[in-house]
């Protein structure tokens, strides 16, 4: 019963939910370009590692994990995945390629499309959003996360965008989908096209919100069943989150908000409380966390795509269908915290070659009418490699693969 109150509580409007969610007085191929004289030659580093028996790299950071801790690490979830945001390097993979339910994590795809439409000028943040009968009725559906939408109240694109992230308001994203595409089904087509453009071919997307189709009545996507839900792999979710943060980094200004008022000035304002309990002030607060999105349905279980920064490094983590959620609603954040610690503490970036390093024993580049007939190749920036703590940072080989166009053409 406590789990039910915490998770749903009629869309999240009760004081009990607010107090329990807050910690108030005890409430519970590496590719780089090598430049010389303005021309570029592409160098590929082929990094060959030996097996896990290699000696452990010693870390100055006293939070570093031992080889035994690294090899024994696992996440108590059906799937888990983490990547370095800057490079896309996979830091952890536990059944990361199996498609499964993602629930409201779906909204990071939907809201990417909203931000994209704003960027392209098709819509504006202050545009009013019509509220259909479908969206209005869904917004007051019991046991769903929502903000109430009234057809006689004006809501802007930004109002509903923020509500979709912070409160995970299902009807809000439906209204935005209808604004952009005319119908939720047409919007789902756009969602499918977008993820396909990112190379994701195993996605099952049947609605904009992540709800089970049971709640959508006659509005389900053509060809889907009344019990279908959206499904993606943890790897897919991490890739989508990376695209979101690369293309629209200001989304973190919204996802990092613990609370925000919705419908300010209307006759039915609502204090939205973020479902991400790792943000400041909540029971599972963790330094550096500033997003992204939770998801919960009976089929998908408790899911969370998170992101955090530590010492200038941003990571993206995904946990799907975490075990023990019914007994402890915080478990998805506990497991995410463990995965974040692993991602930060089990890995370090090691400089393989410094900036301006000249590559020995490599071919030179011819110089036409120059004082020198040829010049050596040098790096315009240092090359770094992610190394896990149970690997040997010196156990690699470097090969140089010249771009034939530049190698055979005199400068």
Image: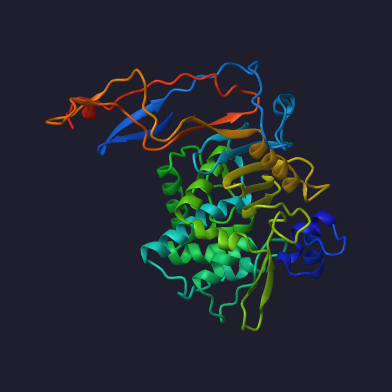
Along the line of sight, which residue is nearer the eye, 316 or 378? 378
The x, y position of residue 258, in whole percent, is 68, 64
Quarter holding residue 23: bottom right
The x, y position of residue 172, in whole percent, is 57, 66
Quarter holding residue 378: top left
Along the line of sight, which residue is nearer the eye, 3 or 402? 402
Q: Is residue 70 above or below residue 88?
A: above
Along the line of sight, which residue is nearer the eye, 60 or 342? 60
State left or right for residue 10 relative to residue 106: right
The x, y position of residue 70, in whole percent, is 70, 28
Q: Residue at x 60, y 34 (%)?
A: 348
Q: Is residue 77 above or below residue 309?
A: above
Along the line of sight, which residue is nearer the eye, 19 or 309? 309
The x, y position of residue 404, in whole percent, is 24, 25
How many marks overall?
Answer: 0
Task: Note whether residue 96 is visible.
Answer: no
State left or right for residue 250 relative to residue 309: left
Q: Is residue 237 above or below residue 110?
A: above
State left or right for residue 343 relative to residue 157: right
Task: Note whether residue 146 is visible.
Answer: yes
Looking at this rendering, what residue extends furthest in the right direction? 26
Looking at this rendering, what residue extends furthest in the front direction? 371
Q: Is residue 288 above or below residue 318?
A: below
State left or right for residue 113 relative to residue 135: left
Q: Considering the image in quadrants, where does the C terminus appear?
A: top left
Q: Residue at x 62, y 43 (%)?
A: 317
| Colour setting | rainbow
Looking at this rendering, what residue extends furthest in the left direction? 369
Q: Considering the image in quadrants, where does the N terminus appear?
A: bottom right
């Amino acid at each position: 019963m406590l789990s039910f109150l915490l998770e749903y509580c009629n869309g999240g409007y009760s004081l009990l939910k607010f107090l329990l969610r807050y910690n108030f007085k005890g409430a519970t191929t590496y590719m780089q370009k090598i430049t010389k004289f303005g021309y570029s030659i592409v160098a590929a580093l082929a990094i060959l590692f030996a097996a896990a028996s290699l000696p452990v790299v010693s870390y100055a950071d006293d939070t570093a994990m031992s080889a035994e801790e690294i090899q024994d690490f696992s996440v108590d979830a059906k799937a888990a995945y983490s990547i370095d945001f800057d490079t896309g390097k996979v830091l952890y993979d536990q059944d990361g390629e199996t498609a499964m339910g993602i629930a409201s994590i779906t909204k990071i795809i939907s809201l990417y499309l909203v931000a994209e439409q704003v960027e392209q000028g098709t819509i504006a943040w202050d545009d009013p959003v019509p509220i259909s009968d479908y969206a209005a009725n869904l917004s007051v559906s019991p046991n769903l996360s929502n903000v109430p939408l009234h057809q006689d109240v004006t809501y802007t694109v930004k109002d509903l965008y923020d509500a979709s992230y912070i409160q995970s308001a299902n009807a809000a994203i439906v209204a935005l989908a209808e604004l952009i595409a005319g119908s939720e089904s047409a919007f789902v087509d756009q969602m499918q096209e977008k993820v396909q453009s990112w190379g994701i071919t195993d996605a099952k997307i049947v609605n904009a919100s992540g709800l089970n189709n049971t709640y959508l009545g006659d509005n389900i996507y053509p060809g889907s069943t009344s019990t279908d839900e959206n499904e993606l792999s943890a790897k897919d979710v991490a890739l989508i989150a990376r695209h979101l943060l690369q293309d629209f980094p200001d989304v973190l200004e919204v996802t990092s908000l613990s609370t925000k008022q919705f419908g300010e000035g209307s006759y039915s304002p609502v204090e939205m409380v973020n479902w991400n309990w790792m943000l400041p002030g909540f029971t599972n607060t963790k330094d550096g966390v500033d997003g992204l999105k939770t998801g919960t349905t009976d089929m998908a279980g408790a899911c969370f795509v998170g992101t955090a920064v530590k010492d200038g490094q941003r990571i993206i983590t995904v946990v799907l269908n975490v075990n023990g959620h019914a007994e402890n609603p915080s478990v998805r954040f506990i497991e995410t915290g463990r995965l974040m610690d692993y991602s930060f503490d089990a890995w370090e970036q090691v400089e393989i070659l410094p900036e301006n390093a000249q590559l020995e024993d490599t071919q030179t580049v011819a110089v036409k009418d120059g004082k020198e007939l040829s010049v050596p190749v040098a790096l315009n920036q240092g090359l770094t490699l992610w190394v896990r703590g149970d690997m040997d940072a010196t156990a690699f080989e470097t090969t140089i693969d010249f771009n034939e166009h530049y190698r055979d053409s005199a400068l």
